[in-house]
């Protein structure tokens, strides 16, 4: 499968614990995005990278959230001191900046449940 | 800031009925527009996109959408729905200036009754 892959698919954790999600984009894509989706809502933008540079972070991304893309390939999203309000589906998407359309290719998501 | 409105939260139709899902966006500049679909248990997939040219765009599975710039709309249509079209549909907009990220609407859940 050469699509966007995310790991783990589902994570259950206790409040206050740290969690990390990984995303492997489509190999030739230079842009990588993180979105969050809660029930009944559309995906909400969190942050994105072009190669290894983090170009924008949403105000939704509190200081407990950090994302990296150290070598311009895979990315990690870490949430420290999780809260129940962090429970959501975390979506990763990638795109090829130069294709001009802005189309994003999504992974299947990592569902976080904070107890 | 750009925003997207999808006024139909849940639509229920019988098979073979015609479908139109509304999408309006608020951004005055040049935009690229998208419809994504999320089938139960699956990831978001692109249904169709508009970025230039003919404002009537055809996508997969018989879907089409029309970009009406004067109305800031990009409604999704299908003349005859099937049970397999049951899914959640998201409209999204990308502005070509400033930050290049997709902004999504809240989605429309479509239920097709056999």
Image (cartoon, coloured by chain):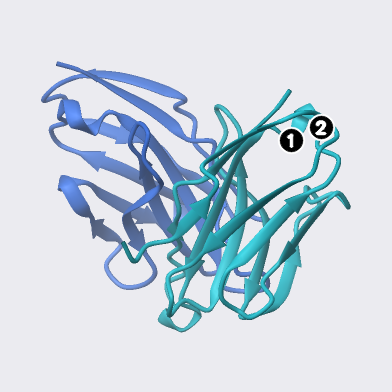
Q: In the rendered image, which quarter contains the N terminus of chain B?
A: bottom right
Question: On screen, B91 above or below A13?
Answer: below
Name the spot of residue B108 as percent of width and height, x first.
43, 31
Mark 1 burial class by Cα count in 10 Å: few <14, some 14-19, many 20+: some
Q: Quadrant of the rendered structure where residue A37 is?
A: top right
Residue A34 image offset from top left, x and y in percent: 62, 56
* Residue A57's disc number: none
Secondary structure at numbered mark 2: loop
Mark 2 lies on residue: A83
Q: Which residue is mark 1?
A: A86
Residue B27 in sight from this viewpoint: no
Return the chain for callout 1. Answer: A
Q: Residue at x 65, y 66 (%)?
A: A48
| Residue A112 screen position, x and y as percent | 63, 36
Q: Nearer the viewer, residue B106 or A23?
A: A23
Whether residue A99 sits left or right of residue A114 in the image: it is left
Q: Are marks 1 and 2 in contact (CB under 8 Å)?
A: yes
Q: Colour of chain A?
A: cyan
Q: Is residue A43 left or right of residue A25?
A: right
In the rendered image, the vertical position of residue B82 relative to residue B29, given as above or below: above
Q: For the C terminus of chain B, give its image quadrant.
A: top left
Q: CA distance from mark 1 to mark 2?
A: 5 Å
Q: For the residue labelled by badge 1, is the local secondary structure a helix, a strand or a loop?
A: helix
Q: Looking at this view, is A112 or A55 the one in front?
A: A112
Residue depicted at 55% across the width and 27% down the height: A40
**Mark 2 belongs to chain:** A
- Against A51, residue A41 (above or below) is above
Q: x, y (%) of residue B86?
A: 27, 28
Which chain appears blue? B
């Amino acid at each position: 499968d050469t699509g966007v892959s995310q790991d783990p698919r589902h994570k259950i954790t206790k409040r206050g614990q740290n969690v990390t999600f990984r995303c492997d984009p489509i190999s030739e894509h230079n842009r990588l995005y993180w979105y969050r989706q809660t029930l009944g809502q559309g995906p909400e933008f969190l942050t994105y990278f072009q190669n290894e540079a983090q170009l924008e972070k949403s105000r939704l991304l509190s200081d407990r959230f950090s994302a990296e893309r150290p070598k311009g390939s895979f990315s990690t999203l870490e949430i420290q001191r999780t809260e129940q309000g962090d429970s959501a589906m975390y979506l990763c998407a990638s795109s090829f900046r130069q294709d001009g359309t802005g189309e994003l290719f999504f992974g299947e998501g990592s569902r976080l449940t904070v107890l | 800031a750009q925003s997207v409105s999808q006024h139909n939260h849940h639509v229920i139709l019988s098979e073979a009925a015609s479908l139109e899902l509304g999408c309006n966006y608020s951004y005055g500049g040049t935009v690229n527009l998208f419809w994504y679909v999320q089938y139960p248990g699956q990831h978001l997939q692109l249904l169709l996109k508009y970025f230039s040219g003919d404002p009537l765009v055809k996508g997969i599975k018989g879907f089409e959408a029309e970009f009406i710039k004067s109305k800031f709309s990009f409604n999704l249509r299908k003349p005859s729905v099937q049970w397999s079209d049951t899914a959640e549909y998201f409209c999204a907009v990308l502005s070509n200036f400033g930050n290049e990220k997709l902004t999504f609407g809240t989605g429309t859940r479509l239920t097709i009754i056999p």
